[in-house]
Image (cartoon, helix red, strand yellow):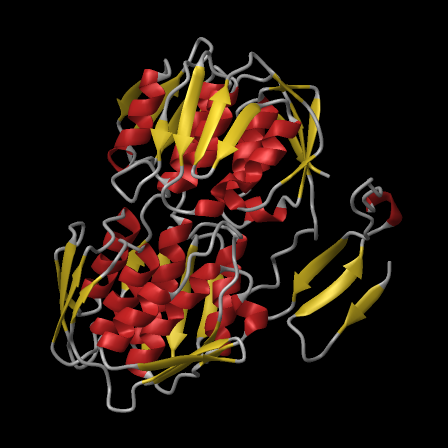
Amino acid sequence: MAYASSRGSFFEVRLISPSEVVPSSPVFVYMRVKLTMTSPYLKQLQWGIMERLRVVGGARLLGTVRVSGAKNSALKLMASTLLAPGKSVITNLPAIADVEYMSELLTRLGCKVEINRQLSQVSIDVPVELGHRADYDMVRKMRASINVLGPLITRALLAEVALPGGDAIGSRGLDFHINGLTEMGAEIYSEHGFVIAKAPNGLKGANITLEFPSVGATENIMTAATLAKGKTVIDNAAREPDVVDLGEFLISMGAKISGLGSHTITIEGVSSLKPATHATLADRIVTGTWAFAAAMTQGDITIENGRADHLELPLDKLVKAGAVVTTTPNGFRVKMDKRPIAVDVATLPYPGFPTDLQPMVIALNAIAEGTSVVTENVFEGRFMFVNELMRLGAKIQVDGHHAAITGIKQLSSAPVAATDIRAGAGLVLAALVSDGVTIIEDAFHIDRGYPDLPSQLQSLGADVSRV
């Protein structure tokens, strides 16, 4: 076994035994390695670079799954702990790679971070004197890193945050974030790949109207406004449950916020906040993914901890496709006993159909009876995964923001590659209803948003493994 390390690095790199080396493919030739994060709070995390999933199609998914905390909420909750010196605790934490990335980022900003995997929680001890720089080598791994901008500018009065990475699903520019913080008195400019924000005299309240109800911009402005002088009003604010969850955490820290879940959020600035403990809400996108998995495989899945009230439109579409959806004491059940019927969908901000479930509805329509049109109104690059789905035999024509799908009875297995988290999940669902064995390259994307998806699928009867 080869070994390499760097004392200044968070990582050790080890070459896996020869029997585990991934065979070369027509497209990629590489060595598979494992990364062992050696910092105290990350040393348990291991996964393979360019790891692949092997999915055998044909199984009906039957049984029960439990949904953990939401990725899109947990990361923002963790970033917002920067607002208050002392130890905050986030519970119901999803066991995903992005949580590890955020933990490392907060550590670099001076926090002491401890993840308790058994309790699914993280404690974050925030110092009085914060660091202010988030470097590219960390930020490039996930777009949610930009959510440290608001807390840093309002507490440290200075922030240098590298332009973010994450999923390549469209421009998703930072204009809404920057314009809002500028209206609050911040001086913001970009230099050498960094967003640099300064507010030497502190931030002041402002009336801010977003051109689009951006989730990230709403969250950054809301967190920054908690310690600003005076009142901030955000019009055309995002209404997503994740925004509400973050707002409720801020309120528990002592923030004065009203209007959560509506188009207008009002924040009265306070002089300081205190640490708090908060449970992350259930992940509605993971919940929705399981619902579509049941419908596509003609399965029967009970989704514990799933919030049907956060998925009214997607579940309505599944019912129109032929699924039976019933509530249970702590979640809901999705059952399908026939080939799905094609459904038209247009993605919109909450409470509309979520863009993060668009790959799943396209995968469903690919095997549904009839034709359908899926319109993407949120992220223009979300259709990138369609070419991969077409490798499985799907009949799809993309024209701008529209995808026209003609359903076929069964897809055919083929090598495909995940381009982002949700595309990866959509390809897994498609592979489950393909004939034969499908290999999904770049499965590390899936690990960023779905806690141990292969094991959960196996518990429902699927033949899925990491290779």
Percent x, y of residue 140: 55, 65
The residue depicted at 35 percent of the width and 78 percent of the height is 152
The residue depicted at 29 percent of the width and 70 percent of the height is 179
Percent x, y of residue 220: 31, 66
Quadrant of residue 68 within the rendered picture: top left
- Quadrant containing the N terminus is bottom right
Percent x, y of residue 164: 49, 65
Most foreground residue, 16 or 256: 256
Q: Is residue 408 above or below residue 316?
A: above
Quadrant of residue 270 within the rendered picture: bottom left
Most foreground residue, 14 or 418: 418
Q: Residue furthest front?
A: 399
Relative to 314, 222 lies left or right: left
The residue depicted at 50 percent of the width and 60 percent of the height is 142
Q: How many marks?
A: 0
- Quadrant containing the C terminus is top right
Q: Is residue 10 above or below residue 285?
A: below
**Residue 87 visible, this angle:** no
Q: Is residue 265 above or below residue 301?
A: below
**Residue 367 visible, this angle:** yes
Percent x, y of residue 460: 53, 24
Q: Residue furthest bottom?
A: 200
The residue depicted at 64 percent of the width and 71 percent of the height is 10
Relative to 8, 399 lies left or right: left
Relative to 310, 35 lies left or right: right
